[in-house]
Structure formats: C-alpha cells, structure tokens
C-alpha cells in the first residue's frame, strides 16, 4: 500500500487527494448498445456487448479487459 509507513494521517491525506477512488466507467464504444436488458446478469451483459463488438469469443476476459470493465460497471451501477 502506498501509505504503509505514513500511518492514519497519511492515509487520510491520500484518500482526500485521491478523490472518490477508482472510477468505474464503461468503455465509450459500449454506449451504442444501451443498458442491460431486464433479467440480464452482468456477465451476460458484458458477453453480449463484447460478442457484438468483437465477434463471438474474440476478446480478452482477463483483468483490465473491456469485458471485465463492462461486467464490473454493470454490477456496480445496476446491482446485477
């Protein structure tokens, strides 16, 4: 952790200047596909959009990938 040796006051300063933390924003290309359909899970939503944009199964699913960003965005924004 960045503030390991600074203690509690260092942590407070870090969080103050860091703002609201890591932002969870969907990729801009995904806006044209809209929002999750009713009853659709975050995983299904991310898979549907990535399949439509990149081709069926032709995309990364690891950390930092567009698939992962979409899945996390839908989970956090809609609780699905």
Image: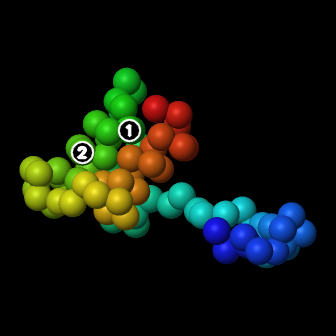
Residue beneath the point at 54% across and 58% down: 24
Residue 25 screen position, x and y as percent: 50, 60
- 8 or 20, nearer to the observer: 8
Marks 1 & 2, CB-CB < 8 Å contact = no
In the image, residue 41 sits, relative to residue 62, either above or below, namely above
**Left or right of 67: which side holds 9?**
right
Q: Which residue lies furthest to the front in this view?
A: 5
Q: Which residue lies furthest to the top in this view?
A: 39
Residue beneath the point at 21% across and 60% down: 60
Q: Mark 2 points at which residue?
A: 47
Marks 1 and 2, how far apart in space?
9 Å
Residue beneath the point at 37% across and 24% down: 39
In the image, residue 49 sits, relative to residue 38, either above or below, namely below
Residue 58 screen position, x and y as percent: 11, 58
- Which quadrant of the view contains residue 15? bottom right
Inspect this view and state whether residue 16 appears.
Answer: no
Q: Could you say which disc has been placed on residue 42 in the image?
A: 1
The colour scheme used here is rainbow
Residue 79 screen position, x and y as percent: 53, 34
- 61 or 25, nearer to the observer: 61
Residue beneath the point at 38% across and 38% down: 42
């Amino acid at each position: 952790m960045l503030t390991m040796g600074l203690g509690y006051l260092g942590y407070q300063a870090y969080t103050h200047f860091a703002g609201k933390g890591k932002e969870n924003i969907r990729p801009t290309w995904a806006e044209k596909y809209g929002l999750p359909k009713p009853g659709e899970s975050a995983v299904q939503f991310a898979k549907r959009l990535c399949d439509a944009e990149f081709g069926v199964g032709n995309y990364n699913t690891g950390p930092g990938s567009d698939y992962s960003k979409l899945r996390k965005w839908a989970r956090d924004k809609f609780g699905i």
